[in-house]
Image (spheres, helix red, strand yellow):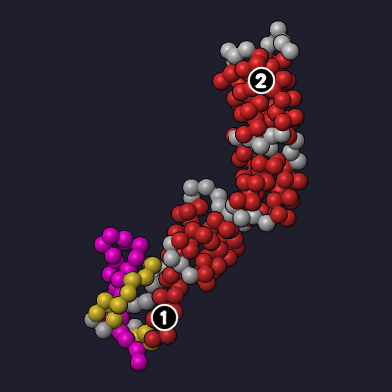
Amino acid sequence: MSEEITAITPQKGNPHRLNISLDGTYAFSLDRMSAAWLKLGQNLSASEIEDLKARDEIEVAFNRASHFLSFRARSETEMLSYLSDKGFSETVSENVINRLKEERLLGDHRFAQDWIDNRVSFRPRSQLQLRHELRQKGLQENIIEDALQKANLDDIELATVAGKKLIKRYTNLGWQDFRRKMAAALARRGFSYETSHTVTKQLWDETHTDTQA
């Protein structure tokens, strides 16, 4: 048994979606992309209606995922969790994630590299801390290891950059307070005791002519 499309009208609150009426009664709404091939007077079978609804759900999920990505890059685990929280099924979520990967909008290898590059540029921290953060994002160990190797990082260099970003806070402190606060700040960024204190002494020597032991 088929039903005839008797009306296709834009939604008042969302012009990107169309209300579809069958046999004179509102039946469901569709994204414009999903409804592109529909026309008045067209007959739809029950299976065609279900297929339209299924494809529309994927389109809605894809649009939500794209919006989620507009704020910052996401890992595949983050995306799967987001779509699940929005009520989409595992099948729909996997379909969307595969589509995003095909369009090169999502991918854990790229995410790991972008995450490390961003941290190194703006908020340097130790390789240990970077590894921990990427694990929290759901990335697999082999992807994390590959990204860290490609980045070719050195903790002394990272700690030095981090310290130089912090040093203005401690410029007027004496050696003892400078050493305590700078080393603690570097430790919070995951640097080891040895690295934190080595870099702290190095930064003190670079900015003070009267070094104190």
Which residue is identified by label 2? 179
Residue 111, horizontal then vertical, whole percent:
62, 51
- In the image, which is nearer the foreground, mark 2 or mark 1? 2
Q: Residue furthest left?
A: 24
Image position of 167 (left or right of 66): right
The quadrant in which residue 77 appears is: bottom right
Q: Quadrant of the C terminus?
A: top right
Q: Which amino acid is tagged 2? A: Arg
Instruction: Examine the rendered structure and indicate whether residue 56 appears above or below residue 152.
Output: below
Cβ atoms under marks 2 and 1 closer than 8 Å: no
Q: Quadrant of the N terminus?
A: bottom left
Q: Position of residue 84 (x, y in %)?
A: 48, 63
Which residues fall within the magenta stretch?
Answer: 1-20
The secondary element bearing badge 2 is classed as helix
Question: Badge 1: how crowded within 10 Å, few (<14), some, or many (20+)?
Answer: few
Position of residue 196 relative to residue 80, above or below, is above
- For this view, does 35 lie left or right of residue 101? left
The answer to whether one can see residue 37 in this image is: no
Give left or right: position of 175 versus 80: right
